Amino acid sequence: MSAVEDIGTRAASGHPWFGGQRVAPPAAAARTIREMLLHEIRDTGHPHQVLLPAAPLALPRASYAELFRVSAALLELVRRTALEAAPTTEGRLAAFAMPESEHQLFLDDQFTEERYAHCVARPDVVIGADGPRFLEFNVSGALGGPVESHSRMEVWRKLYADAQGRLPFSYEDPFAVRTAMFRDLAAELGVAPRVALLGDARDQGDLTRYFDVQVDHFNSHGLTARFFDPANLHEAWDCPPELRYPLGLRDFTIPDWLELGIDTAPVREALDHGVLLVGTQTSTFLSSKLTMGMLSEGRPWMTAAERALVERYLPWTRVLGHRWTNRGDRKVDLVPFAVAGRERLVLKESIGMSGKQVLIGREESPERWEAAVAAAAETGTSIVQEYVEPRTCRLAMIAEGAQETHDAEIAPVFGPLLFNGRPAGLFSRFFGDGTAGVVSLKGTYSSDNCVVAL
């Protein structure tokens, strides 16, 4: 049986963008596939999933490439929008109304701070009636996707490779591309290719394997790497010059560490002693959903082509406040418009993770929606965004305890990974039972998979 099968138009609510083919489940028993998936992702803090994929999610080559091409173009616009909000870090902190917790860990050298802010990025994309729509940009060394995608693909490679090691699909390995990124950064900066992976096991359920698998890949592919937590981070710089780690991956977020009571003072000390951690703290401005609102509304410096790109791929998004704005070819009073448009809008706080600060209007009562919009309008730190009704595709799934696979119609959220602007694998999250809503591995316990190109 061929690994690739035609599915035609069997997906009733699907979209031509998904194509008419998929990767069929491998010949292995459903129980074996599930055990392999669980084994590969074990001890990484990955949440338990009742429903697991039985095959990689596959896209036509053109659709796959479109996500990366547009992601790179939009990321550059996101970066410019965030940096031009104010000429200095202090001005941006005020413009974005950043909480005090985010007023730390900036480099004294603002050029370096800005240059390496967007090294690691992953937008969230759904497929609507008009194709891909980019809901937000996650710009952070701690974003989800690399470990999960690499782990899933390790299983699919074992199950689908022929005797010569050939696969019926193509993909990018996030670990390989990220290793190349650090090799390039070391050359660009003129430093030794020694990489510190900075995190804390408490952020991964007191398990270190999440970090260990990444360090192992670095060390076996031409870099010298080591995992550091705050307690031993001083060893990355307080040592003979030839043993120092001049580069690092900042695999944590300040909100997560605050919640866990983890002190960031050792990070400040490492930065002051020349350890460059990517992405830099300026990435918080790029990740802010206010940046998406500003970009959607248009900036004076944008060309006609850039405006057309934004109009095509971003849903209508506005920074919420007591003001007038444009909706199509008409002017609207934003707060009353948002209240009246509950069924068509989503409310998001500027900084949030795992979908915790998101309200989908159609899922809220009119009273609660109006109260939330009114409160958000006073702070000026939220956006309203057009709700995108996600289209679906077909994927084989394995339920816990099941002896056979089954087909499901899923509404995936795609996460194209970009490392230093290069495509680095395509992550996907979805509800395995076909439902829609706020999709998050740790927030709403969705399923996940890697995506391949046919």
Image (spheres, grey):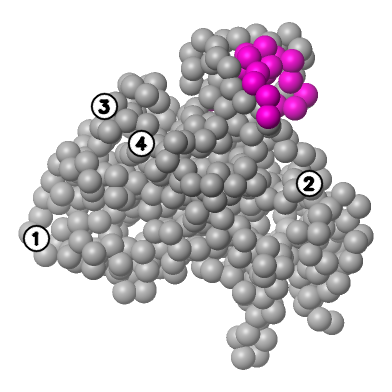
Task: Single out the mark in the foreground, 3 or 4.
Answer: 4
- Indicate the secondary structure of the residue bearing disc 2: loop
Instruction: Look at the numbered discs 1 and 3 and tell me whether their residues touch, using CB distance below 8 Å.
Output: no
Distance from the alpha carbon under mark 3 to that under mark 2: 41 Å
**In the rendered image, which residue does mark 2 sit on?**
129
- Indicate the secondary structure of the residue bearing disc 3: helix
- Indicate the secondary structure of the residue bearing disc 4: loop
**For mark 1, does the 10 Å Cα neighbourhood hold few (<14), some (14 to 19), or many (20 or more) residues?**
few
Q: Start and end of the magenta stretch?
A: 329-349
Distance from the alpha carbon under mark 1 to that under mark 3: 33 Å
Mark 1 and mark 2 lie on one chain; the one further toward the N terminus is 2
Q: Which amino acid, mark 1? A: Pro
Name the residue at the bottom extreme: 164
Instruction: Look at the numbered discs 3 and 4 and tell me whether their residues touch, using CB distance below 8 Å.
Output: no
Residue at x-position 63% and y-position 47%: 313
**For mark 3, does the 10 Å Cα neighbourhood hold few (<14), some (14 to 19), or many (20 or more) residues?**
few
Q: Is residue 366 above or below residue 158?
A: above
Distance from the alpha carbon under mark 2 to that under mark 4: 33 Å
- Indicate the secondary structure of the residue bearing disc 1: helix
Q: Which amino acid, mark 4? A: Glu
Residue at x-position 59% and y-position 22%: 325
Q: Residue 367 appears at what percent x and percent y?
A: 73, 8
**For mark 4, does the 10 Å Cα neighbourhood hold few (<14), some (14 to 19), or many (20 or more) residues?**
few
**In the rendered image, which residue does mark 3 sit on?**
90
Q: Residue 333 appears at what percent x and percent y?
A: 63, 14
Distance from the alpha carbon under mark 3 to that under mark 4: 13 Å
Instruction: Look at the numbered discs 2 and 4 and tell me whether their residues touch, using CB distance below 8 Å.
Output: no
Distance from the alpha carbon under mark 1 to that under mark 4: 37 Å
**In the rendered image, which residue does mark 4 sit on?**
84
**In the rendered image, which residue does mark 1 sit on?**
241
Q: Quadrant of the N terminus?
A: bottom right
Q: Which amino acid, mark 2? A: Ala
